[in-house]
Image (spheres, helix red, strand yellow):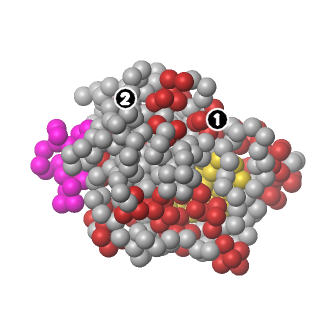
Amino acid sequence: MKHPSFYSRSSLLVASLAIQLITVMASGGGGSSGVTSSSTVAALKNYNAMFTFGDSMDETGNICAASSNKTELDVLTCTRSPYGETYFGRPACRWCDGRVVVDFIAQALGLPFVPPSKAKGKDFRRGVSMAITGGTAMNFSFYKSLGIEDPVWNHGSLDTQIQWFKELMPSICGTERSCKGYLKESLFMFGGYGGNDYNVQLLELGLTPLQAMNYTPKIVTAIANGVEKLIALGAVHVVVPGIFPTGCLPIFLSLFGDAAGETDFDGTGCLKPHNRLTEYHNSLLRKQVDALQRKHHNSTRIMYADYYSLVYQMVQEPEKFGFSKPFEACCGAGGGKYNFDVTARCGMEGATTACRDPSTRLSWDGIHPTEEVNKVIAGALLRGPYCTPPILG
């Protein structure tokens, strides 16, 4: 069944806008920061800068800086209250109630928040974000060949984001030779990519998870090729995340749960077919990352982040981590078990009040995690054990 376009005229969701709910934590509860202090990090590793790539999970403002289309900005509810309320006190073009993962990592490394690459008059020498809402691993021309016209999927693919970075390099580090030296002491956060590629297939093309697996090798190869391109530019420290268990997110449970049979759910309450797709993607990606690690072991440090294992554990045992109601969105007016409806999503009229305490929830808007979860994610990436090797390892 083909679902209606999630970017269309009235209000349907910019679906999954990189719905990578990577709610992760190596140990401890949701109330603990899980982020190493700047002084500790400085003693372990000094980075010149941090450069980030990806989608709405790591969005820090590119979609707002790049778009002048009022209709599009109206659909992008991250520009409305209550987004940003926990930390910024206002919408900050981030898809959560406060900081995203790369914000916490930047703070822990003693670096400034990474500004969006589309911002004017910014100094990018200490870091910049190419991540943008709707970002995909595959180029838009690929999806256009499949009949996709929705412009949300044409904001900036993996290759496009790398091109943006190449255009900024002279202002960041000067000549090609000086850039090689500068970039080898910088941290690259490369995705995770893939979530939106499956969103196009599942939500726009109406494919089943099993059918979507036919495209997984192409998607994973695109990600691996992207890592190679960064290495060729001079990157040495690169984090490559997998993707979350899609079948555990409120958006997918809301859209597909009613039509699913009893055997389509696992004991936790997640959709098994969608999680199998995620597992397949991550298994192929892990093999590619392992191959890259072997190929470049003398010159690079490529880190694989296993988001699937972490988020699934958190969904299984939310109380152990200090969270509750893992399938219910904190913000939105969908009601019911998942509190998610594409016509009443967070930030829309009637959905401008979040739950009382977002820090106790996994899901902020049915798609993206809360700030508290993002803080936990950052801690897990910095220390492991689900980032191999850890950023601070």
Distance CA(mark 1)–CA(mark 2): 22 Å
The residue carrying pointer 1 sits among few (fewer than 14), some (14 to 19) or many (20 or more) residues within 10 Å by Cα, namely some
Instruction: Examine the rendering and report whether any part of residue 263 can be seen.
Output: yes
The percent coordinates of residue 152 (x first, y second) are 49, 30
The magenta region covers 251-270
Q: What's the residue type where badge 1 is placed?
A: Ala
Is residue 138 shown above or below 357? above
- Residue shown at the point (46%, 24%) measured from the top left: 150
Name which of mark 1 and mark 2 comes first in the sequence: 2
Residue under the image location 63 percent in, 51 percent down: 52
From the viewer's perspective, is 27 left or right of 232?
left
Counting from the top left corner in percent of width and height, residue 310 is at 39, 64
Residue 306: x and y, percent?
45, 62
**Secondary element at image label 1:** helix
Q: Which residue is painted at 13% across and 50% down in the image? A: 263
Residue 84's place in the image compared with 198, above or below, is below
Name the side, left or right, on which 11 lies relative to 155: left
Q: Give the image quarter of residue 3.
A: top left
Q: Residue at x 68, y 48 (%)?
A: 115
Q: Tag 2: residue type?
A: Leu
Is the C-beta separation of discs 1 and 2 under 8 Å?
no
Q: Say which residue label 2 marks.
A: 12
Q: Quadrant of residue 311?
A: bottom left
Magenta segment includes 46 = no
How many numbered discs? 2
Q: Which mark is residue 65?
A: 1
| Identity of the residue furthest to the left in this view | 262
